[in-house]
Amino acid sequence: MTLPTRPRVPAHLTEAAGRVRASAPALAAAQIEYLSDIIRMRTYTGEEGPAVERTLQEMRSGGFDDVRTASAGDALGTVGTGRYHLLYDAHLDHNEIADEDEWPYPPLEPTVDDGKLYGLGASDCKAGVASILYGARLAAELDLTADCTVTVQGATLEEDAEGFAMRHLLEADGFPTPDAVLLAEATDLTLRRGHRGRCEVRVKVRGKAAHASTPELGDNAISKMRPILDALDAMTPDLPTDGTLGRGTQVVTMLTGPHTPNSVPSWCEATIDRRLTPGETPESILAEIGAAVGPLGGTAELPIQPVTSWTGLDLSGPAFFPGWLLDGDDPLVDAGRLTCAALWDQEPPVDVWQFSTNGTYSAGAAGIPTIGYGPMEEEYVHTPLDQVDLVKLLKAAMFYALFPTAYTHIRSG
Ligand SMILES: [Zn+2]
């Protein structure tokens, strides 16, 4: 964690922050109503259509320009016309419910209790969408877009394939490369500047089938997998480590083979979840794993992550999501700290995420400066206590309303 120092807040930013704080409360009820509406919609990855439509409607009634749907189904709307392009991103799909009986409130019935709004996807990441949408709207209403053009992206496909929808937007739809990307994932109103990457690797070993009554005629692939698992575990101490992001990890998460209980298995496949430090590539990972398992008869490959957008596009691609880390002194981090200092006279801690986000594309693949800021708390993500604090929800909108002014000041200073 980087220890904050106090940025100097210029007078015009202090004045703008005062207007943001004074005006935001009038939007709180509408923000909560919009968030409640999208929580009522079950939007698993690839099924975001209704929440996208509802988001487009909210953008139109909120005075956004150029409200449209990306070809991969993301909701897009713009405020401001300045020379710096900011992309505010948060996703509308959510994780699947494991056991509905564990939820204190029905997942699809948003419930306010003691200042918190409970509901499926509140913390990952629908409250983030409500934060950026209302922040951009407030910036436009207060004429605070400064030298920025801000596009709000209610994104799709993040849970299964983070970064795939943004990649399609920039590389296929021709959306201009933004100067900066801001991700409204869970940060509890602090700043994030990176996370480890992840990838999936499958290691397969072949044997020879035989009837289970005469195993001596076969070559058992499960037995051949045993030393391979040991070899994979033995790699752990040598995995790359990053001073800030921490250690790369590797764990076997699934074993599969033929579903024939009365045969000697002819193949066995191990699925590996690997967490990456910046700079690791599919080639470097397959080479390392191949060197460990090859002499034991194993072969390694990177599988294809299947994903289809609600608009019907096949965006399947390699299950590789690079890590990234923005410099702690980057102007984008400074702009985030300055925004908080102007609004609340205190600087947020700057840290890294444990989980992976759309930053895997924006920063990890495309090299676009990226930071994270959101009202949600990491401990409630993907849990039955899925929730957002309503005071924090409004504060995040204030952050996104003031950010273009702070960013313009930093860039032109
Ligand atoms: Zn998320």
Image (spheres, rainbow, N blue to C red):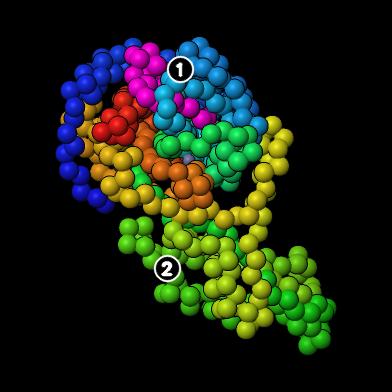
- Can you tell which quarter of the image residue 168 is in? top right
Q: CA distance from mark 2 to mark 1?
A: 46 Å
Q: Which mark is nearer the camera, 2 or 1?
A: 2
Q: Residue placed at 65% from the left, 59% from the top?
A: 303
* Amino acid on which the number 1 mark rests in the picture: Glu
145 in the magenta segment: yes
Q: First in sequence: mark 2 or mark 1?
A: 1
Disc 2 crowd, CA 10 A, few/some/many (<14, 14-19, 20+): some
- Label 1 sits on a secondary structure element that is helix
| Residue 413 seen from this side | yes
Kindly indicate the quadrant of the structure image that contains residue 231.
bottom right
- Nearest to the observer: residue 130 or residue 211: 130
The quadrant of the rendering that contains the C terminus is: top left
Q: Position of residue 247 (x, y in %)?
A: 39, 64
Q: Which residue is mark 1?
A: 33
Instruction: Tell me if residue 272 is in the magenta stretch.
Output: no
Q: Residue at the location (67% across, 81% down)?
A: 297
Which one is nearer the viewer's eye here, 315 or 107? 315
Disc 1: residue Cβ within 8 A of ligand 1's nearest atom: no
The amino acid type found where label 2 is placed reads Pro
The residue range painted magenta reads 135-155
Q: Nearer the viewer, residue 351 or 378?
A: 351
Tell whether 236 sits left or right of 259: left
Q: Which residue is mark 2?
A: 240
